[in-house]
Image (cartoon, grey):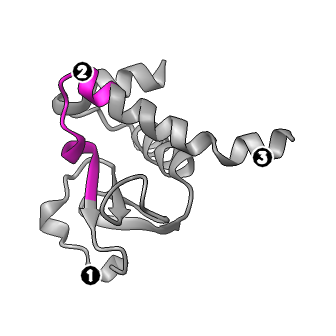
Amino acid sequence: MQRGQLKGSSEGVKDMMLLLLSYSYEKEETLFHYVEETCLAREVQMEALPVTPCIIVCGSSCYASRLFMLSVDHKVVNDHTTDFISAICLMLGSYYCLNIHYPVKLGSTLEFLQR
């Protein structure tokens, strides 16, 4: 029974992330970069990505996407993350392990998640 509950928990995290961004008056586009659902890592327009870690969402929204990528410093470093929670953890871990400061435009949301 508990395993079934964990499967749907990603939707709640998506809701929470979007709510945090809205509450902090921070734009969703600064954290998530949307590409077509069938886009490959080599097809992502790197110049449109920030140098800080960000999540590339393959699809029209976080809810519709089945694939996420992680970008750091204009490079896709992980191109096959199928779980939203894993994508968030990878992004936060990248900030921590690489000792990168949070961007000003996302500071409130990322600080809240960290704590």
Residue lying farthest to the left in this orientation: 47
- Residue in the foreground of this view, choosing between 23 and 54: 23
**Residue annotated with mark 2:** 24
- Residue in the foreground of this view, choosing between 52 and 55: 55
**Residue annotated with mark 1:** 43
Name the quadrant containing residue 28: top left
Mark drawn on residue 4: 3
Amino acid type for the residue under numbered disc 3: Gly
Cα–Cα gap, marks 2 and 1: 32 Å
Cα–Cα gap, marks 1 and 3: 35 Å
In this rendering, the answer to whether 66 lies above or below 51 is below
Residue 93 at what x, y percent from top left?
A: 49, 42
Q: Nearer the viewer, mark 1 or mark 3?
A: 3
Amino acid type for the residue under numbered disc 2: Ser
Rendered residue at 26%/61% (across/down): 34
Query: What secondary structure is marked by label 1?
Result: helix
Mark drawn on residue 21: none
Q: Which residues are magenta?
A: 20-33
Cα–Cα gap, marks 2 and 3: 32 Å
* Quarter of the image that includes the N terminus: top right
